[in-house]
Amino acid sequence: MLTRDERKDCCDRIERLIDEGYPIFNLRSAFPYIIDNSFKTPCHQCIVMENGRQWTCGRCIEIPNLCSQCGFFFAAEFSLVFSGHAGVIFDMLRTYLRYI
């Protein structure tokens, strides 16, 4: 879990690295949703595996209130893409196709 300030700090750092030209797959358009944790949770398209166990979207079932402080950026991005956020979908295509 990450606090809002920790999510913002991560997004700010990643954004600086993107601006410097590093090959980063995080989607800048998702950062405001990630910082404010304003995306649909849990994301049923995300599977997290840890220590031989598997969870949908980061152990949401086992840890109460985990979604309210989600630190899995990919879960937010997938949730936004699969919820039909056009800007995030476009950003995903632009970002991923750059490296294919």
Image (tube, grey):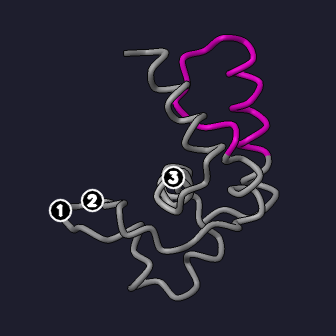
| Residue 43, image x, y percentages | 44, 67
What residue would you read off at disc 2? 49
Amino acid at circle 1: Gly
Marks 3 and 2 sit apart, C-alpha to C-alpha, by 21 Å
Marks 1 and 2 sit apart, C-alpha to C-alpha, by 7 Å
Q: Depth check: give the residue in front, 80 or 55.
A: 80
For residue 56, which quarter of the picture? bottom left
| Residue 99, image x, y percentages | 43, 15
Q: Is residue 35 left or right of residue 96?
A: right
Q: In this view, does 94 lie to the left or right of 15?
A: left
What residue would you read off at disc 1? 52
The mark closer to the camera, 3 or 2, is 3
Amino acid at circle 2: Met
Amino acid at circle 3: Val
What residue would you read off at disc 3? 81
Label 3 neighbour load within 10 Å: few <14, some 14-19, many 20+ = some
User: Which mark is first along the chain, 3 or 1?
Assistant: 1
User: Dot 2: what SS?
Assistant: strand
Image marks 1 and 2: residues in contact by CB distance under 8 Å:
yes
| Residue 71, image x, y percentages | 58, 59
* Residue 24 part of the magenta segment: yes
User: Which mark is first along the chain, 2 or 3?
Assistant: 2
- Residue that lies at the very extreme toward the left in this rendered image: 52
The mark closer to the camera, 1 or 3, is 3
Image marks 1 and 3: residues in contact by CB distance under 8 Å:
no
For residue 28, which quarter of the picture? top right
The mark closer to the camera, 1 or 2, is 2
Label 2 neighbour load within 10 Å: few <14, some 14-19, many 20+ = few
Residue occupying image coordinates x 45% and y 20% = 97
Magenta residues (range): 9-29
